[in-house]
Amino acid sequence: MEAMVNKFQAKFRKAREDISRWDELQSHLVSQFRNASSIIDRLQVLQISRNYGNLNCIDNIRDALLSKQIESLENILVSMRKTLEEFHNIVLSLEKIHRDGRQLVKGGSSRPTMKQLQQRIGIKPSLTDCLDGLLLLHDIHHSEYLLKSSIILALSAAALKPSGSDLGALLQLLIDQPNIPSEEGMKELFGS
């Protein structure tokens, strides 16, 4: 039984690596979102001819600036979609870790009884705790991925019909996502 718990700890080490990468991607996505929001705000100002003052005498200055900003916005949105793909890959990895954990319990040579699944060895978690923890990690990150996807979709829509308050609310939602500290779930599962 202890050998199986040790195998689960290896799975949690992999999950911890995934969650660390998730945290890095979160910072990157927030930065990308801020950059896209700035461009969307700028586009509103650039569309008004009187904002150009003396520059209006330069042929096509307004169109050139608008086109360059739209191109930059498109590049950022493409980059954000790639970041979302990386989030999705982490969700898939966490799902696989959980599935492998279930298979480890089911597919062993001696299938553990319910009592063995709930038994604790010293300060280590029970196998049930391990399986529940892996499922919880997957569920939390899957939900956050869906939230991020919705926010990025809303940002794309906001680019067509901008509203400063909407962009601010979306950014705050992205920053305040229902994140749990990485150590919180892991501490219980490692027993330390």
Image (tube, grey):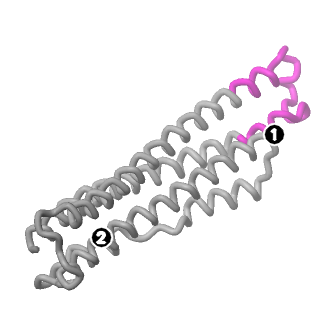
Residue type at mark 1 is Val
N-terminal-most mark, 1 or 2: 1
Disc 2 crowd, CA 10 A, few/some/many (<14, 14-19, 20+): many
Callout 1–callout 2 Cβ contact below 8 Å: no
Say whether residue 58 is left or right of residue 112: right
Magenta-drawn segment: 40-68
Q: Position of residue 92 (x, y in %)?
A: 40, 50
User: Can you tell which of label 1 and label 2 is closer to the viewer?
Assistant: 2
**Residue wearing tag 2:** 131
Q: Nearer the viewer, residue 181 or 133?
A: 133
| In magenta segment, residue 117 | no
Dot 2 falls on a residue whose secondary structure is helix
Q: Position of residue 183 (x, y in %)?
A: 31, 71
Give me the residue at 76% from left, 28% from top. Answer: 66
Task: Determine the image quadrant of residue 48.
Answer: top right
Q: What's the distance in space between the residues labelled 1 and 2, CA to CA?
A: 53 Å
**Residue wearing tag 1:** 45
Say if 189 sits above or below 16 in the image. below
Q: Magenta-highlighted stretch: main secondary structure?
A: helix
* The label number, if any, that marks residue 91 in the structure image: none
